[in-house]
Image: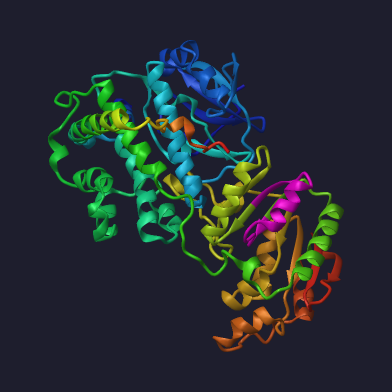
Amino acid sequence: MANYTRHPASFKDPSGFVFEWEGKYYRQVNQYYAAQYRQLMDSGLYAQLVQKGWLVKHEEVHTNLTNSDDWYLTLRPETIPYISYPYEWCFAQFRDAALLTLRILRTALEFGMILKDATPFNIQFHKGKPVFIDTLSFDTYDPSQPWVAYRQFCQCFLFPLYLEHYLKSDIQKILSTYINGIPVDIIAKLLPLKSRLNLGVWLHVYLQNTNIGEKGNKATARFSRKKLNDLVTHLENIIRNFPDDKPIKTTWSNYYDDTILSQSYLQEKEKLVRDFCAQTGARTALDLGANDGHFSKILAGMGMEVVATDMDSRCINRLYLETKKQSGLALLPLVMDVSNPSPAVGFNNQERSAFHDRIQMELVLALALVHHLVIGRNISLQTLAGYFNKIAPQLIMEFVPKDDEKVQQMLRSRQDVFIDYHQEQFETVFSQYFTIKRQENIPGTKRTLYWMVRK
Amino acid sequence: MFLSILLYVDPGSGSYLIQVIIAAILGILFYFKNIWWKIKAFFWRPKKEDTSENDNING
């Protein structure tokens, strides 16, 4: 019977754990958490949160699938098809995840419960919206106590938002190192001097960074519901007042608006991509270097489930804000650098899996990407073909030749050491790993679109 | 096991007293803000108060 695999990230909470059994994910509730689970269900809190679409739905399975002694109940949560991590989110995704956490906390308080932890790993994006997935995070509320997860909320949500807000730079790589949140002493040193003039920063960062709190404990710290309300209201106000989009223009954020590439190029390419994608018969697609998601949206419109990635977080931010408005669109935008995808991190390097182990799609789309990887990042065609072979059962790829204007632009600032970068070599190398099913020139350009199937 | 439970349920152990101090400061702040709102409301038509429910995080 007990033929299950415990999820490697599910080891911290004695309340229960997530496990895989016959290809499906379940969550076990232990005896330890029985009373709190009953309160969550019987108080009406669960129904309220699910009705609002804030908490993942589950079915109760009354079978002890893991054969454990402290088993109370098994839950079968609704499947979230694509798992993403906070260091792959853009600013607006992060902000929405933070607001959802506070909103759930507020609702829980109305039902006599509180969130015992506040980590962004408890949030996933499903059909364009954030949803809370840890059903066992709710605890009975004791109004005389402060919020146990306040510091965690600051480190995991508030500090990263402050950092990105003040630095106006991408911080995903920093977050992938500090998976349990950025420590307060680090953030206090990283924020610029002008941030000290902000009351929120002063209270939640600089005051927390003093040693005043060290002498405090549960016994000396008396709290109240009103105090907690004030704290949550303040955190909400800070986070809601962050602007949706940062006013900086990056290399890619207006690529299609500013580009010298003509509208007719885009139309011709669109026609071909539609045609190629329909031929693949794929139901899921990963769009690498998606930019503003023009082609991801086309694929999603064709009924595919799409994960769109780009290394430019502003592009992903714009795409996220757009997909949020179109309810139910199966498009998940994520920040990811193809030359350095998210690694496996955390305890035993298994707690949070690597990007390509987590997100595996039937089709990979790599449009106008090859020259950035070969010429921009010195990744040889041979190495690149090996990479795509690993991640792509089917591949739609655009080859951009050396005499293309965009490639010429890139070569102007560096020495041309790419003697092997030409179409013939591209086809030879990729043919070692893929069968080229179809290739078409994009009219009006020297670029070629390929459809390949893994050998 | 017992220690690990304590560590888990208490991720912000050092943050208790800080929260008390922050909440006290916020309490004073919101008290005066409330008075200011009441004064404003007395002279001007009150605006609809912003609540987190008005956020459109869910699209």
Please say whether residue A149 is visible from this viewpoint: no
Residue B37 location in percent, x, y? 29, 32
Colouring of the image: rainbow
Is A136 above or below relative to A403? above
Q: How many marks?
A: 0
Q: Nearer the viewer, residue A130 or B30?
A: B30
Residue B46 falls within the magenta-colored stretch: no
Q: Name which residue lies at 61% across and 87% down.
A: A417
Is A402 left or right of A332, judged from the image as shown? right
Is A285 left or right of A71, judged from the image as shown? right
Is A84 above or below relative to A396? above
State which quarter of the image contains the N terminus of chain A.
Answer: top right
Q: Name which residue lies at 51% across and 50% down.
A: A89
Please say whether residue B5 is visible from this viewpoint: yes
Is A175 left or right of B19, judged from the image as shown? right
State which quarter of the image contains the C terminus of chain A.
Answer: bottom right
Residue B1 location in percent, x, y? 33, 27
Q: Which residues are magenta?
A: A287-307
Is A410 above or below relative to A36? below
Q: Nearer the viewer, residue A432 or A342?
A: A342
Q: Nearer the viewer, residue A282 or A103?
A: A103
Q: Name which residue lies at 35% across and 42% down.
A: A238
